[in-house]
Image (tube, rainbow, N blue to C red):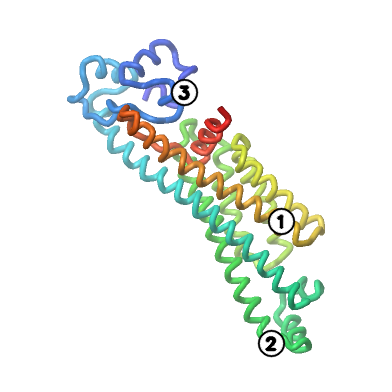
Amino acid sequence: MKYNGSYWEELPQEGKEAATKLGYSQELWDADKVPESCNQYWKDLDKNQQQGAEEMGYDEHSWNNLKATRRRSMYLLYLSHLCFVLGSLFYFQLSMVSIRWDQYTRDHRVPQSVLDEDDDDTWEEWSYENNHSDILEVREYYWVQYERNNVLGAFSYAAMGFIEMCSNRNGYTLHNLLMPLGGLLGMINALQYDGSAMQYGSAVSLTFYLLSCTRLDFFFVGSALECIVSYAYLAGFDGAWLLYLDSIACLLWLYCAVVGVASEFGFSFEQFLRKERAISTPCSPLSCAQQKTDRYRH
């Protein structure tokens, strides 16, 4: 499309006139939504709409291919929303696993010197001396849960990032590369067995998350809290307060994901109720959440 990648205010006057002929408004254009005419074949457009389409760079062949392209884009972006919600849920479950393990070790009075050791011999010796024969099995269970949720959360965020990167109206930029890179680093980090390497890898991955979404209030705050927690561990701090701060950060991510879904599907329902028959082209999860947040402010 001739004016692809431009916002309404950036369009020249002839671009706005061409878009208006097709049924666009500034609200639809800037939200990456399309009017009813964009779901019709060329032969079903009236002369005025065909003229508007030609002024925007379409001919009959490219216009008729638009419907199939938009449908593929719609499915991909719905998948992106799903990845955002699932990834946030996995990360929240990860924080709950950490809290439950911390509580378990406190209840059983496991000393910090044992907690700092990764080898089974140290744990087995301590469990034998303190009559906690089941602690090795419990430790293994929590580790499996931790690793699984960590890998799945990072994979979901990486998938969301790749889909959003491919769908971004501004193309490939450093900004939209950071989310998938952060997710990939998170997956690699989750499979590490070296505690020190995991802490450093987590800090880098979370920093990428933070830098990828600086315009999104709740995701930015959640990512900032996660970075604080990660860097606090690197600095040698410890305690239950870090685990609860991590849980709050994951809740903010989950809230952001739910808001994004509500914004996307709520927009379509709103258009249906108003009988404007606008067709939804889903926006990216992070963009949708930002739009919903802006509506709350107004």
Question: How far is disc 3 from disc 1 in space, using C-alphas?
Answer: 39 Å
| Type of amino acid under label 1 | Tyr
Q: In the image, residue 106 lies at what x, y percent? A: 75, 72
Of all residues, the one furthest to the top in this rendering is: 13
Q: Is residue 284 left or right of residue 174?
A: left
Tag nearer the camera, 2 or 3: 2
Judging by the rendered image, the residue that carries numbered circle 1 is: 200
Element at label 2? loop
Give the position of the C terminus as an image quadrant: top right
Give the position of the N terminus as an image quadrant: top left
Say if 91 sits above or below 121 in the image. above
| Type of amino acid under label 3 | Ser
Q: Residue at x 63, y 60 (%)?
A: 95
Q: In the image, residue 99 lies at what x, y percent? A: 67, 64
Judging by the rendered image, the residue that carries numbered circle 3 is: 6
| Type of amino acid under label 2 | Ser
Question: How far is disc 2 from disc 3 in space, using C-alphas?
Answer: 65 Å
Q: Residue at x 78, y 77 (%)?
A: 109
Q: Quadrant of residue 277?
A: top left
